[in-house]
Amino acid sequence: MAEDLSIVQGTKEEKYQSVIPQIKALVEGEPDLVANLANIVAALMEQFGWLWVGFYLVKENQLVLAPFQGPVACTRIRKGRGVCGTSWEKAVTVIVPDVEKFPGHIACSSKSRSEIVVPIIRGNKVMGVLDVDSDQLAAFDETDKHFLEEIVDLIIFE
Ligand code: SME
C-alpha cells in the first residue's frame, strides 16, 4: 500500500471502517510482530488521536510494554493489576468510563480519563493486550470493543 494513511472525518464506525482495511494491508505478508504492532498503533493514533495507544505482551508471566504512541508508560504489569492485568486475567475486553472509579487503576498519565483494554487471545491463551487511553471521560463503548477486537485478530504470532 501507499505509505500515507488515508484519514477520514466522520463517525467512530466510519473511522474504524476506513482504518481497518489499511491495517490489514500493512500487516499482510509481514511476519515481524514488533513491526506490525508498531504500524497498528501508528495507524490508530493517526486516525483517532487518542491520548495513548499501545500494546503490552505477556512475557515470563508479566505484561511488558511493547510498541505504543503517547506519553511514557509503566513497563511491567502483573496479572490482575490495573485495567490491563484485569483484562489479561479474565481474558475479556474491559471498558472503563472513568478511570478514577476503577479500583487499582494504574495511572501512567494523569491526563487519562477513560480506557479500554482488549486481550489478544490465541487458542486459550492471552498473548498480550491492546490498551487505549483517552483524555475524555467515557470515550469508549461497544463500538470500540467490536472493532478493536477485530483489529487484534489481525495480529500474526509466529
Ligand atoms: N492504565 C493501565 C496501565 C497502562 S497505561 O494506561 C498505558 C492499567 O490500569 O492497567
Image: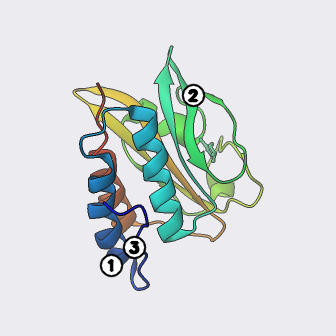
Q: Residue furthest bottom?
A: 10
**x 51%, y 13%: residue:** 60
In the picture shown, does residue 51 fall above or below 77? Answer: below
The quadrant in which the C terminus is found is top left
Q: Which residue is mark 1?
A: 14
Query: Mark 3 Cα within 10 Å, few/some/many (few <14, many 20+)?
Result: few
SS state under label 1: helix
SS state under label 3: loop
Q: Between marks 3 and 2, how big is the CA–CA gap?
A: 31 Å
Q: Amino acid at mark 3?
A: Ser
The quadrant in which the N terminus is found is bottom left
In the displayed structure image, the side of residue 69 where residue 86 appears, left or right: left
Q: Which residue is mark 2?
A: 64
In terms of image quadrants, where is residue 78?
Answer: top right
**x 35%, y 65%: residue:** 142
Q: Position of residue 21 (x, y in %)?
A: 26, 62
In terms of image quadrants, where is residue 135?
Answer: bottom right
Q: Position of residue 91 (x, y in %)?
A: 36, 36
Instruction: Tell me which image quadrant ligand 1 sits in.
Output: top right
Q: Which sits in the foreground, 64 or 81?
A: 64
SS state under label 2: strand
Residue 101 visible (yes or no): yes
